């Protein structure tokens, strides 16, 4: 068999000349930086008016900057029950996370390592709330929950936990897929009891996954509007309900901005904490040096 | 040697079988709580919506099967369906394109990538309702952008509450493009990086690698994100309510209005809208899964 | 198309690392030659390969291909192709399209690219596998396809990063034979990283031995075994015999007596360790006299370890064994390999015959 190894069949663009010293193409670099700048603007710009409005008392129309700076918006937000609404939102988010995270972790562990009957059907049902619009579940179940005399707060919690389960199950399945059960078996052979294995080996190893899952579940409770408003029927006033009430009216821009900013800050802080936790955790525990974090070619 | 059936052999045989059965029960017990909640909400929500929509569970009076609820608002249902599909399609396509571009910038650029990654990640935990409020403050006729460019309200197009639902699509696209960026960048960084290196060593330029390796390998993640976004935007209420116009109404807004109306017949009508929305969602999930199966990577 | 490759004081220090992962490594590879970079894990051998490929950017030093510096050249423009330990076949392409990849991205038409790829599938003895999905291949087949894909890119230098170490021994020797056949047909310049010295010996013309980022010796395989330049090299190549002593007038004096340098070699005066491969030591009946060119040493068998068809003997020098109880000897020992069938038992006396031509003296 003869292979024309020496010559290419097609003209080779990589001639020896073009192989000499060659910097990365400046055009490509400029395009990349330009696109990146546009994307940065795209993601950041919508938050800007919120930040400005939250410290503006008056901002009459054509002026590009507020005509009067101040904290009227904040004062109004406080007067309209902003603090208790904030507290209720935090509690709702925490409650959803506290229920959906362990349930999701249990289900994910069984699906990853155990012998769950009909595993595809079970995963399908656990992911199904993602495909079901929240208002459908609310409209179908309100009548049932009402007749069973389930308190509105519990009903809201139940529906939000179901909405959060796809996220916690999925996140924990990813975590358990990367989790080597041999660590736990090793601990058992070293004489650790089941409880010890859980506390000293199993939970520490999946802790980053649990933190991610809990964060997502918290977000479901924290951000919800439609379930709280329909099932709660006005008895459970959370931060999004206040934002919605003021945003629907006219001339409330400052108070909407203050409430909105206060609705952004807690999850942002959690996100930063999560990133920090993940890094410290990965750095401290699994200090695997990865020398091949390769730059892509061009220096 | 003759096999002698003795008690020892029986125990030896019985033990693995007993432990297999125990494993199965344990796995079921682990999955059960999450499964019951998700199953109750999904199956109960859909089932009860169907039952109410065909008149079998009226608030007062006799239960009687009828399809009146589907016919009563026939025109509104159809226009609402068309409108919802339009909004969801536009938001999904734009989110995927922008999100994919962001994911590629995130994984290829160094500093620029980090900036885009941070800004898109910070967008994720912002509640949609807050996003709607910010988009309103940004592009309404008295928003930040017309102020910055000094465009009078009379000339500025009706982006908020206008005929083309621009603000609604923009809000969805803003939030969901960050979601796509997060998901796809994760896949690119973990699973695609080595293939990208291999392709580079085989002589593929950056543009060729993008076309022949990176985008094909990212496709499944993009499809999964697209399904989630489409279903979410189809069934989401608060953004369309806040940034849309009073008529025509997208399906969730229509259902919400009927559900909270005081007319006795409106509950079944709201349930009918919910059932239609669910059917469309399930259809979209089925189409999406079929597309996913047709990608060559699907195992 | 095969090119020469030269490394000039290549150094790579990773961010935050105390010392260099690769420290001033220089060697050259002639066109069509196969060089094995050999070293224990953490010796920096993969970093050398990744730097050549352009996947890691060296901290300093030059990489020359056909005499031209490739610094700043993106990996895809270097004309290298690399086969990793994992085959990394593109999962969205068929076997044939994987092999045709380089031609496709070079702008060739699909038909031409596939026709070209077919030849390379034949070269790796996988004719007819082209239309299969890559998931339908066994481990050995996957690695063959990866090799075909790399060759089809007509690399100026073919880089192999432990390509066969995930395969079982039988498949591995098949792959060694295949690589030899490929070299005979298309003579690519090959640089291969391995931690397996037998593999390096089978596959490569020359070996660059690395330890902790430093190049210990770059030589033909045989000389790495018989003429190590240092004790480190001797040990990394599996040498077991080390006899400390002193060289006076070109003659080494140690517990086994005086050994003169073989013809053509000169040993510098001063302290030095005599090393000799255990495979070269012959074991004769006690009292045998040394033939021309051999040194005879009276020994007693101190230990015997089974090595499959062969047995490895630890031989204590007789004059020491006489005044110490058996097993507690910690003086210099010789090691020899004999066929497993030879009935040399522990405690038996014998004469070890060491060929002078196999001896080398290295610094202690």
Image (cartoon, coloured by chain):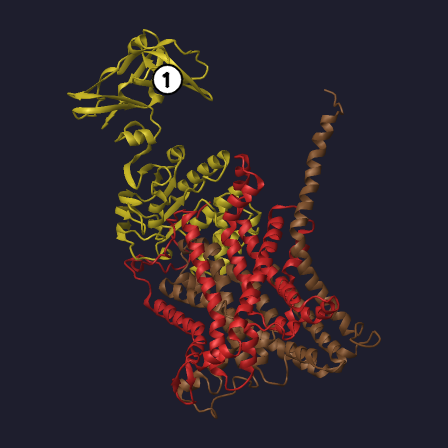
Left or right of B8 in this view: B155 = left
Q: Which chain is red?
A: A
Residue plotted at (27% across, 58% down): A21
**Relative height, residue B269 to residue C103 (above, below):** below
Q: Which one is in front, C132 or B296?
A: B296
Which of C43 and B242 lies nearest the eye of the viewer? B242
Number of on-image labels = 1
Left or right: C215 with respect to B257? left
Seen at 46% across and 39% down, the residue is: C175
Up-down relation of residue C25 to residue B33 (above or below): above
Of the chain colours in the picture, the one used for chain C is: yellow
Q: Residue furthest bottom?
A: B154
Q: Quadrant of residue A145?
A: bottom right
The answer to whether residue C115 is above or below residue B44 is: above
Colour given to chain B in the rendered image: brown
Looking at the rendered image, the quarter that the N terminus of chain B falls into is top right
Residue B253 position, x and y percent, is: 64, 79
Point out the residue furthest to the front here. A79
Q: Residues within 10 Å of mark 1 (few under 14, many from 20)?
A: many
Q: Is residue C294 visible?
A: yes
Q: Position of residue B90 (x, y in %)?
A: 56, 75
Relative to residue C196, is residue B286 drawn left or right?
right
* Left-right relation of A213 to C349: right
- Return the residue nearer the eye: A268 or C320: A268
**Residue A186 percent coordinates (x, y):** 52, 37
Percent from the top left, x then y, of residue A75? Answer: 46, 79
Q: Secondary structure at mark 1?
A: strand
Q: Hey, which residue is sitting farthest top in the picture?
A: C287
Disc 1: which residue? C314
Q: Quadrant of residue B144?
A: bottom left
Q: Chain of mark 1?
A: C
């Amino acid at each position: 068999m003869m292979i024309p190894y020496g010559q290419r069949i097609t003209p080779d663009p990589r001639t020896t000349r073009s192989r000499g010293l060659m910097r990365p193409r400046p055009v490509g670099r400029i395009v990349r930086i330009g696109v990146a700048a546009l994307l940065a603007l795209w993601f950041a710009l919508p938050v800007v008016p919120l930040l400005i409005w939250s410290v503006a008392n008056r901002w009459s129309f054509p002026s590009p900057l507020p005509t009067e700076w101040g904290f009227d918006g904040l004062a109004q937000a406080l007067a309209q029950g902003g603090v208790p609404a904030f507290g209720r939102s935090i509690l709702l988010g925490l409650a959803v996370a506290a229920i959906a995270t362990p349930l999701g972790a249990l289900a994910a562990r069984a699906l990853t390592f155990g012998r769950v009957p009909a595993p595809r059907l079970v995963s399908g049902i656990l992911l199904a709330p993602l495909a079901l619009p929240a208002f459908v579940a609310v409209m179908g179940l309100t009548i049932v929950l009402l007749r069973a005399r389930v308190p509105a707060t519990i009903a809201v919690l139940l529906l939000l936990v179901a909405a959060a389960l796809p996220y916690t199950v999925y996140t924990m399945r990813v975590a358990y897929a990367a989790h080597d059960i041999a660590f736990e078996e090793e601990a058992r052979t070293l004489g650790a009891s089941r409880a010890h294995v859980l506390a000293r080996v199993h939970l520490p190893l999946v802790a980053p996954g649990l933190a991610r899952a809990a964060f997502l579940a918290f977000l479901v409770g924290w951000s919800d509007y439609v379930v709280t408003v329909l099932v709660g029927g006005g008895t459970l006033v959370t931060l999004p309900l206040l934002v919605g009430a003021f945003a629907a009216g006219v001339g409330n821009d400052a108070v909407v901005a203050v409430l909105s900013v206060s609705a952004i800050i807690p999850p942002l802080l959690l996100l930063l904490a999560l990133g920090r936790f993940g890094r410290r955790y990965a750095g401290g525990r699994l200090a695997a040096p990865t020398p091949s974090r390769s730059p892509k070619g061009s220096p | 040697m003759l096999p002698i059936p003795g008690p020892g052999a029986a125990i030896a045989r019985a033990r693995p079988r007993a432990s297999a059965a125990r494993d199965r029960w344990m796995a079921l017990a682990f999955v059960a709580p999450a499964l019951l909640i998700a199953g109750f909400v999904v199956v109960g929500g859909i089932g009860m919506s169907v039952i109410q929509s065909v008149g079998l569970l009226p608030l007062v009076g006799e239960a009687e099967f009828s399809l009146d609820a589907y016919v009563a608002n026939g025109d509104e249902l159809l226009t609402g369906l068309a409108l919802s599909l339009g909004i969801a399609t536009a938001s999904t396509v734009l989110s995927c394109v922008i999100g994919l571009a962001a994911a590629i910038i995130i994984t290829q650029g160094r500093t620029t990538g980090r900036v885009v990654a941070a800004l898109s990640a910070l967008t994720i935990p912002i509640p949609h309702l807050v996003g709607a409020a910010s988009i309103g403050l940004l592009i309404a006729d008295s928003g930040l952008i017309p102020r910055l460019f000094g465009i009078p309200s009379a000339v500025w197009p009706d982006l908020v509450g206008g005929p083309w639902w621009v603000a609604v699509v923009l809000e969805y696209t803003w939030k969901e493009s960050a979601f796509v960026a997060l998901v796809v960048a994760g896949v690119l960084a973990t699973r695609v990086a080595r293939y990208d290196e291999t392709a580079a060593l085989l002589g593929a330029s950056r543009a060729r690698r993008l076309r022949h390796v990176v985008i094909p390998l990212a496709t499944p993640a993009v499809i999964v994100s697209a399904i989630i976004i489409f279903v979410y935007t189809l069934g989401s209420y608060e953004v369309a309510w806040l940034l849309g116009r009073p008529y025509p109404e997208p399906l969730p807004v229509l259902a919400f209005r009927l559900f909270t109306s005081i007319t006795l017949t409106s509950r079944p009508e709201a349930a009918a809208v919910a059932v239609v929305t669910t059917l469309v969602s399930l259809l979209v999930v089925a189409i999406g899964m079929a597309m996913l199966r047709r990608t060559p990577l699907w195992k | 198309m095969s090119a020469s490759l030269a490394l000039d004081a290549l150094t790579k220090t990773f961010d935050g690392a105390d010392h260099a992962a690769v420290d001033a490594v220089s060697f050259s590879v002639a066109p069509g030659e196969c060089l094995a970079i050999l070293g224990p894990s953490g010796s920096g051998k993969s970093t050398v390969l990744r730097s050549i490929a352009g996947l890691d950017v060296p901290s300093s030093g030059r990489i020359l291909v056909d005499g031209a510096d490739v610094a700043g050249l993106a990996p895809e423009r270097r004309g290298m192709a690399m086969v990793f330990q994992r085959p990394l076949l593109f999962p969205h392409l068929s076997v044939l399209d994987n092999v045709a990849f380089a031609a496709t991205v070079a702008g060739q038409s699909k038909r031409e690219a596939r026709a070209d790829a077919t030849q390379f599938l034949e070269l790796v003895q996988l004719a007819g596998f082209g239309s299969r999905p890559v998931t339908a291949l066994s481990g050995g087949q996957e690695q063959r396809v990866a090799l075909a894909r790399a060759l089809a890119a007509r690399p100026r230098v073919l880089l192999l990063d432990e390509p066969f170490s995930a395969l079982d021994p039988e498949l591995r020797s098949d792959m060694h034979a295949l690589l030899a056949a490929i070299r005979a047909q298309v003579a690519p310049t090959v640089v291969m990283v391995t931690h397996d010295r037998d593999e390096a010996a089978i596959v490569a013309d020359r070996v660059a031995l690395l330890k902790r980022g430093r190049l210990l010796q770059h030589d033909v395989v045989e000389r790495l075994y018989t003429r190590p330049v240092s004790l480190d090299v001797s040990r990394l190549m599996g040498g077991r015999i080390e006899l400390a002593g002193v060289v006076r007038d070109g003659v080494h004096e140690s517990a086994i007596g005086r050994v003169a340098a073989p013809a053509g070699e000169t040993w510098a005066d001063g302290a030095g360790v005599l090393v000799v491969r255990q495979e070269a030591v012959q074991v004769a009946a006690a009292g045998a006299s040394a033939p021309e060119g051999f040194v005879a040493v009276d020994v007693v068998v101190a230990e015997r370890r089974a090595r499959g068809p062969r047995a490895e003997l630890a031989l204590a020098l007789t004059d020491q064994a006489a005044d110490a109880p058996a097993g507690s000897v910690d003086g210099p020992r010789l090691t020899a390999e004999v066929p497993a069938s030879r009935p040399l038992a522990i405690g038996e006396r014998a004469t070890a015959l060491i060929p002078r031509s196999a001896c080398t003296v290295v610094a202690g």
